[in-house]
Every structure is written in structure tokens, then in C-alpha cells.
Image (cartoon, rainbow, N blue to C red):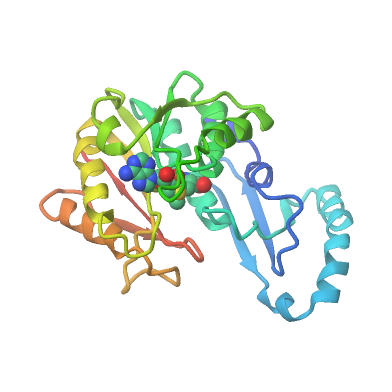
Amino acid sequence: MQAPETRQHPCHAELLKANLNPGSQQPAFYIHLCRNCPAIFYSWTLDFDFFNSLTPIQKRALRLLKPLNVLFEKLNWHVEVVPRPANEDMITLEQRINLFHLENETLVHKVEGDLAEFGCHHGKSSLMIRKILDAHGPDKQFHVFDRFHSGQADVSFRNVFEENFRAAGLELPVIHPGLFENTVPSELPGKLSFVHIDCTTNPHDPALKERIMHLLEHIYPRMSPQAIGLVMDYRDPEKTVGGSDSFPGVKDACDDFFRDRQEQMYVLYGNQFPHAYFRKQA
Ligand SMILES: C[S@@+](CC[C@H](N)C(=O)[O-])C[C@H]1O[C@@H](n2cnc3c(N)ncnc32)[C@H](O)[C@@H]1O
């Protein structure tokens, strides 16, 4: 008999595919393999960068993807070859995988509280959070916090965010527009089970460390035991493999915050964008 969480799993590949840009002509491919077994659900990606220099072959290979994937399906292999996500995505394929496993874990283990994202932009990561939530914890609320304008031009992108949710046929989260400095802590849910902190904008932004500190100071006390905080752009030069080092303020803030606490940051592979998480202790 399958464990309940396995029985409920939507195919990981399906979740990822739903969030990839189908028109993307990126010069690289990923192969991801998914296997559902009673106890563990796992997957990995391979990035074939050698396609970079082979544009005509790559174009032909793109046309082969469909029959190839049909063949894999007929063979009942949980393997799918998909184009790499578009560069404009602010969350990489590897980070989507991290997000899937960590959020899913809090839902399967019934960690108390709601979910929240701090920095949602057009909603690429929010769409995934919502989709995973719909599959495993529909009675929980999902909150997003963002000022919804770029800072340079006073143009709101809240409508783009909402349109993306409508196009995906997903329920909108509870939206908290405005600066975190104004909405946090006053609009925070009472209890949190999973948070995604993704609020970097300009490289070497001098206010970044203070912003992350502000969020952690207010979010942390509301996190239930075993709740997970996933932090975008946390890069440890000694542990992180690859990844941009444009936002050192993220690590500075997290390291200062957790210096005298029981929790620690665990780095994850995120490809071009680094990623890390912490798990709230009792
Ligand atoms: C990197 S983007 C988020 C990307 C998003 N998670 C995704 O996957 O597409 C960072 C977001 O943080 C928001 N942000 C940065 N500083 C903020 C602040 N002080 N208050 C509210 N939102 C802020 C920006 O408006 C921007 O949408």
C-alpha cells in the first residue's frame, strides 16, 4: 500500500511543466526524471549546455521533444525532456524543485499555519506555491506581500500578477500590497507553516540586509515548530555550488539573525540563483 502522501502526489514533472515558458527557445535542455515510490519521491535535472554551440541541431532537437516524450510515456518511464525556463524567470528549475519538496513536506507533515511569500513580482513562484497547496492543503490560506511597483517607475504590476493566476485557473492568494515596512507585522497571519522570502531587487542594494532582518524578526515568532523558511539569493561562498553573488546582504542578515538561535541555514543548489532554507525548531 502506498503512503498517503505518495498517493496524493501530482506528477512532479507536471508541476514543473505547468510553470515553464512553452515558447522558450533557450539554448539548453533539461532532462528531469521523476520516480514515485512508496516512501520517497525524487527527481533530478541534467543541463546539457553543449547545445549552446549547436543552434541548428538544437532547433531540430526541439522538434523531436514531443515524440521522444510520447515514447517515454509509452514505456512508462517517468522521464521528460523539456526546454530550459526562460531567462526572465526569477526562479530557476532547480529552485522550483526545492520549493516543491520543502513546501510539500510542511503540508504532508501537517505543520500548523498558513503560507506566505514576501516578494512575489509577477507570481512565478506564487503560482507554484498555490498549485502545491491546492494538491495537499486546500484548507490553508496563502498570503503574498509585495509593493507591486518597480521603484523606478510608479507602474503597478499587481494586474500582471492577478492575470497570471487567472490564466493558470488558480485561486488568487490574499494580497497585501505595499512596503513590507508597512504591512509586516500588522498584516501577517497569526501562524505560519511555510514562507518564501524573495525580495532582492538591485544588486548590492544597501537596504537589503535591513529589509530581510525586518522580515525575519516578525515572521520567525509566528512560525510553527517544523515550519520552513526558504530564502532566495542566500549564497555561502564556501558551500554554495555556483550561483550569483550579487546579494550578499541576504546571507549577512540571515547569519546575524540565527547567530544566537538554534536554527541554521542549509544551502541548496539553485543553478544561477542561490537558495537556502531554515527549519523552525520547537
Ligand atoms: C525578485 S522579485 C520576486 C520574484 C518572484 N518571487 C518570482 O518568482 O517571480 C523581488 C520582489 O520583492 C519586492 N520588494 C522588494 N523590496 C520590497 C519592499 N521593501 N516591500 C515590498 N516589496 C518589496 C519587489 O517589488 C519584487 O517584486
> Looking at this rendering, what residue extends furthest in the top direction?
139
Residue 199 screen position, x and y as percent: 37, 48
**196 vs 158: above or below:** below
Residue 192 screen position, x and y as percent: 32, 30
> Looking at this rendering, what residue extends furthest in the bottom direction?
53
In the image, 262 versus 59, the foreground residue is 59
Quarter of the picture containing the C terminus is: top left
Q: How many marks?
A: 0
**200 vs 58: above or below:** above
Residue 68 shows in this picture: yes
Residue 2 shows in this picture: no
Ligand 1 positioned in quadrant: top left
Q: Is residue 93 left or right of residue 191?
A: right
Q: Quadrant of residue 71?
A: bottom right
In the image, 119 versus 190, the foreground residue is 119
Q: Is residue 255 left or right of residue 202?
A: left
Residue 2 screen position, x and y as percent: 59, 33
